[in-house]
C-alpha cells in the first residue's frame, strides 16, 4: 500500500523533529588529540597530464583504499584515486580527445562522474556507468568547452555520499588558447593553486565519522575539521604576490562564505564553467557544495592572512530551522606572504564573453522543478524513512513529488535546443542544484538579476528556501534515447536518499 507524502512546514517539521529527538544539540565530534597541531604545510595536488599523442590524451586512474595521516601518528582509512586520499588534478586542452581508463580496486561498486563536462551520456560516469571490483571502465570523449575548473567524483547509486566523503574526488582543469593570452597567473602550484575545501568529522581513533546522527541525513554530512587538499587547515607559503586560487567546494553538504581575515578585496575571475566577462571585485564569495570559483588575491603587503568561512545565521527561526540554515565561522587556510616574490602579472580589465549563446528568446521549452523534503505519516514515519535511505520505496527527499527511481526516465529533451528551467525550493533549507551535461546561465532569483559573481556559465546553483531561480541552458549535440543524464541536489546525502531525477536527450 502506498504511503502519502506531506510537504514539510515549519510547524509539522519541528513537531516531527522533536518527536525523534532531533532538537538535542549535536554530540561533540570525537577527534584525534593532534587536531590542534599548528603549521600543517599546504600540499599542491599532483598534476596528471596523461600520455599525449597529438590531440589524443590517455589517463590511467586506479580507485583504491588506503590510509592517510591527517593527524600526527594517526592513520585514517580512506579512499583515493592513484593515491591514498583524493585524486590527481587531471589537465587537458579544449579540442583534445581524452580516454580515461578507470580501474576499480575497492570492494564495492563505484563510478567516476566528470562533473561539468559536456559529453555523451554513456561516458558521463553517473550511476548507470558503474564499475565493479576488478573492472576497468574506459570512457572516451572530446573536450568541447572553454577553459574552466571542473572536477570528478564518485556517483554510485545510494553511495555517492560515503564514497566522496572518504576521498573519491579530484579536479579536472581544462585549458584553451584564448585563456593563455589573458596574462593570468598560470604556473601550477606557484601562483596558480588548486584548493579543494572539505569539512570532515573524525572519531577518537582517527577514523572518519559518517552519518552517526539523524541530522546528518537530514541536513547533509557536515564536520568541524577543515581540510584543504587533504590537509587540516594548512599554511600556504606564498611564492608570488599575485595568487590565482582555484577554490572548489568538495564538501558533501556545507556552504561556505569565503573571506579573508582582514576583509581584503580580491577579484573573482571565473565560476563553475569558465571566465566571467570581467573581474569582479569583492571581499566575500559564497560557495555551495560542488561549486568552483577562481579568484585573484594580491598579497604584495607580505602579511599573513587567514582564508575563513564567515558565520551564517538562520535568524529568529525555531531551533531546528536555525540549525539547518546556519554555520559557524571556520578557518580554511593561512596564507603566509612574507617571502613572496613580486609577480609580473597584472589583474586584467577584461576577461572574455563565453561563446556559448544562450538567448531566452530561443528557448523552446520551459520546465518547473520543486525541491521538496516531505513527511510520511507523521514524525516518526519521516525519521524512519530517512534511516532507510538507499532502500527501495518512497523517500522524503523529492523533486516534483518524486524520489529517484533508476528505472524511471522523468522527461526527454532534444539536442541542440535551448530550455529555461525554474527551480523552486519549498523545503526549509537551501539546496545546490546540479544538471549533468550542460552549462547554464542564471537568469534571475525571485525575478531579480543574479549577483555579478554568478554572471558566468555554471553547472550548480544554490536555491534558498522559498526561492525560485530561473536558469537557461542549451543541450549539446549528443543524443541517446536509452542512457539518461541526472539532475539532483548536490548535498550528497539528499541525492543518495532520492532528491535526483533522470532525463534523456534525443
Image (cartoon, helix red, strand yellow):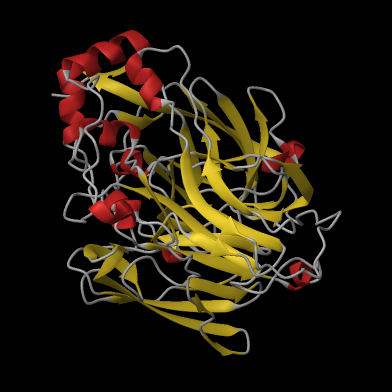
Left-right relation of 82 to 249: left
Q: Nearer the viewer, residue 97 or 248?
A: 248
Q: Nearer the viewer, residue 488 or 328?
A: 328
Image x and y of residue 126, in percent: 38, 57
Left-right relation of 445 to 131: right
Q: Nearer the viewer, residue 233 or 47?
A: 233
Residue beneath the point at 24% across and 11% down: 15
Image x and y of residue 378, in percent: 19, 14
* Residue found at the very far left of the displayed protein: 1
Left-right relation of 38 to 404: right
* Residue found at the very far top of the displayed protein: 11
Q: Quadrant of residue 408?
A: top left
Whether residue 85 is situated above or below residue 413 in the rendered picture: below
Image x and y of residue 397, in percent: 32, 31
Quarter the N terminus occupies = top left
Whether residue 335 is situated above or below residue 143 in the rendered picture: above
Amino acid at each position: 500500500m502506498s504511503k502519502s507524502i506531506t510537504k514539510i512546514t515549519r510547524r509539522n517539521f519541528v513537531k516531527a523533529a522533536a518527536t525523534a529527538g532531533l532538537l538535542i544539540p549535536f554530540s561533540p565530534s570525537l577527534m584525534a588529540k593532534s587536531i590542534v597541531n599548528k603549521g600543517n604545510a599546504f600540499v599542491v595536488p599532483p598534476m596528471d597530464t596523461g600520455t599525449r599523442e597529438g590531440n589524443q590524451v590517455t589517463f590511467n586512474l586506479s580507485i583504491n583504499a588506503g590510509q592517510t595521516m591527517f593527524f600526527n601518528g594517526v592513520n585514517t582509512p580512506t579512499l583515493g584515486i592513484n593515491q591514498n586520499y583524493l585524486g590527481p588534478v587531471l589537465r587537458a586542452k579544449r579540442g583534445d580527445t581524452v580516454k580515461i581508463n578507470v580501474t576499480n580496486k575497492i570492494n564495492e561498486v563505484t563510478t567516476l562522474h566528470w562533473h561539468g563536462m559536456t559529453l555523451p551520456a554513456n561516458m558521463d560516469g553517473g550511476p548507470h556507468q558503474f564499475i565493479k571490483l576488478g573492472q576497468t571502465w574506459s570512457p572516451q570523449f572530446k573536450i568541447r568547452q572553454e577553459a574552466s575548473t571542473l572536477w570528478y567524483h564518485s556517483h554510485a547509486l545510494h553511495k555517492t555520499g560515503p564514497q566522496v566523503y572518504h576521498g573519491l574526488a579530484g579536479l579536472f582543469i581544462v585549458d584553451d588558447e584564448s585563456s593563455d593570452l589573458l596574462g593570468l597567473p598560470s604556473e601550477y602550484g606557484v601562483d596558480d593553486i588548486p584548493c579543494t575545501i572539505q569539512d570532515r568529522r573524525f572519531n577518537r581513533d582517527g577514523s572518519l565519522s559518517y552519518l552517526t546522527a539523524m541530522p546528518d541525513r537530514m541536513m547533509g554530512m557536515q564536520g568541524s575539521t577543515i581540510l584543504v587538499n587533504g590537509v587540516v587547515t594548512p599554511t600556504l607559503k606564498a611564492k608570488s604576490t599575485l595568487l590565482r586560487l582555484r577554490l572548489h567546494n568538495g564538501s558533501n553538504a556545507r556552504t561556505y562564505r569565503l573571506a579573508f581575515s582582514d576583509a581584503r578585496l580580491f577579484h573573482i575571475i571565473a565560476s563553475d564553467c569558465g571566465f566571467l566577462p570581467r573581474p569582479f571585485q569583492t571581499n566575500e564569495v559564497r560557495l555551495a557544495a560542488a561549486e568552483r570559483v577562481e579568484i585573484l588575491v594580491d598579497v604584495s603587503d607580505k602579511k599573513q592572512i587567514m582564508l575563513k568561512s564567515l558565520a551564517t545565521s538562520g535568524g529568529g527561526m525555531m531551533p531546528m530551522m536555525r540549525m539547518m540554515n546556519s554555520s559557524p565561522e571556520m578557518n580554511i587556510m593561512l596564507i603566509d606572504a612574507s617571502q613572496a616574490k613580486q609577480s609580473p602579472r597584472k589583474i586584467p580589465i577584461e576577461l572574455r564573453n563565453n561563446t556559448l549563446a544562450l538567448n531566452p528568446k530561443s528557448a523552446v521549452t520551459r520546465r518547473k522543478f520543486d525541491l521538496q523534503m516531505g513527511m510520511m505519516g507523521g514524525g516518526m514515519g519521516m525519521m524512519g524513512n530517512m534511516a532507510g535511505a538507499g532502500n527501495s520505496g518512497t523517500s522524503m527527499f523529492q523533486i516534483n513529488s518524486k524520489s529517484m527511481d533508476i528505472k524511471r526516465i522523468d522527461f526527454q529533451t532534444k539536442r541542440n535546443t535551448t530550455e529555461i528551467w525554474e527551480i523552486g525550493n519549498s523545503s526549509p533549507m537551501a539546496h545546490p542544484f546540479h544538471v549533468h551535461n550542460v552549462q547554464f546561465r542564471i537568469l534571475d532569483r525571485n525575478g531579480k538579476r543574479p549577483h555579478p559573481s554568478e554572471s558566468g556559465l555554471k553547472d550548480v546553483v544554490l536555491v534558498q528556501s522559498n526561492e525560485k531561480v530561473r536558469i537557461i541552458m542549451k543541450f549539446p549535440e549528443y543524443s541517446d534515447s536509452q542512457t539518461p543524464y541526472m539532475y539532483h541536489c548536490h548535498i550528497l546525502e539528499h541525492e543518495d536518499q532520492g532528491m535526483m531525477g533522470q532525463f534523456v536527450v534525443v
